[in-house]
Image (cartoon, rainbow, N blue to C red):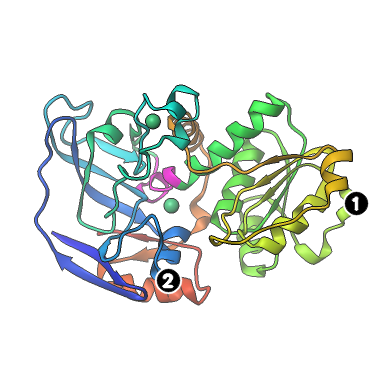
Amino acid sequence: MRSVTLCAPGELRVDTVPVPEPSEGELLIRVQAATTCGTDLKAWRRGHPQIPMPGPLGHEYSGDVVAVGPNSRFAVGDAVMGVHSAPCGHCRWCQADQPNLCESIMETKVLGAYAEYLLVPARIAAVNVYPKPADLSYAQAALLEPLACVAQGIIEIQRILGEQTGTVLVIGPGAIGLMFGAMLKQAGWDVTVAGRNPARLQIGTEMGLSCVPLSELDACDGFDVVIECTGQVEVWEKSIDYARRGGLLMLFGGPPGGTRASFNTHRLHYDQITLLSPFHFGPPAVRKAYEALTQGLDLSPLISGERTLDQAAETFTDLESGRGMKYVFTP
Ligand SMILES: [Zn+2]
Ligand SMILES: [Zn+2]
C-alpha cells in the first residue's frame, strides 16, 4: 500500500509498504478521508516531540473496515471514524478520572492515516472508534479527533460551570478556534470569535459565528469565558484582559517548549479569574465530539479541498503559506 512518510523537516515521500494484518482486537481500515492538522504542520516544519521522524504521518481519519482481528467490536464493511489514542484505564491518571493525561496515551498512539490502509490498535479500537452514520461525510467524520480536543476543553469548562452558558470569546480563528465556536454555539453559548486573519474570520462567518478583528475587540466587554487558541505567548498574556471579573480563561493553544508567560497578578487574584489549560482528550470527550458530529454540527467550511497522497508535499507547502485551513486526503 502507499503511505506518506515524513523523512525530515519539509520532506515528505510516498512509500510502498506492506498492508498490515490485524491481530486480536485490531481493525484494518481502508482510509477514505484523512485530514491535515496543525500538529502535522508543526512536525513538517521543524519536527515534533510526539511525531517520530522518519515516520508515517496523519492521525485524523475515517474509512471502512476491511479486516478484523479476533474479538473485534466491528465487522468487515463497517464505515467507521476514530481517533489515534486511548488511555490504559488503570494508571494513576486514569483512576483519577483524567484519562486525557494517561501515562501511556502518547506512546501508544497510532500515526499513518495518510495511507491507503490504517491498522487501529486494539486499545484504541475498544473505546475510541465509532460507527460512521451514512449521512455524515467521510471528510467530516475524520474531524472527530480535533473535535475531541475541543470537547475535552468544553468538559473542563463544564466541570466548573455545569450546564450554565453565557458569553464566550474565542481568540484565534484557526480550525480549533472555529470548532470551539461551532460546538459552544450548538450548546447555547453567545459566541464571539476574534483574530487577525480575515480569510479565516470569513470562514467563521460562513459557519454562522459572530467574527471580529482582534483589534476591534473592546477589552471592557468582559466575557464570561475566554478561550485562547493561537498558542502564541503574547496572546496567552493578553487574553486575560478579555475575561470578566470572576470569569474563566482557557489557554488552549500550546506554545513552543521552553516559553514562559506572565499575568497581572491583581487580575488573577482580586478579579478571581479561573485559569484552565487542558491537554489532549479522553474517551468522554471523543463521545461528546461524536454526538456533536452525528447531531448535525456542520464543520464542512473548515475543509479547504481534497488532495491525493501524491499531493502531500504541495499540500503542506500550501498550509505553510497560509493557503487553506484543512485539506482532506482521499487515499
Ligand atoms: Zn489533529
Ligand atoms: Zn492510564
Residue under circle 1? 220
Q: For the residue marked with disc 1, what is the amino acid? A: Cys
Query: 27 or 310, which is in the foreground?
Result: 27
How much space separates mark 2 and mark 1, taking CA atoms?
A: 39 Å
Query: 317 or 208, which is in the foreground?
Result: 317
Say whether residue 258 is visible.
yes
Is residue 82 highlighted in magenta?
no
Q: Is residue 46 above or below residue 146?
A: below
Residue 230, given in percent of the width and then of the height, sits at: 62, 59
Q: Are marks 2 and 1 in contact (CB under 8 Å)?
A: no
Residue 16, given in percent of the width and then of the height, sits at: 12, 65
- Per the picture, the main secondary structure of the magenta-coloured stretch is helix
The quarter of the image holding the C terminus is: bottom left
Residue at the spot 51% in from the left edge and 35% down from the top edge: 292
The quarter of the image holding the N terminus is: bottom left
Confirm if mark 2 falls within 8 A of ligand 1: no
Q: Quadrant of residue 215?
A: bottom right
Q: Which residues are magenta?
A: 136-145
Give SS at disc 1.
helix
**Circle on res. 46:** 2
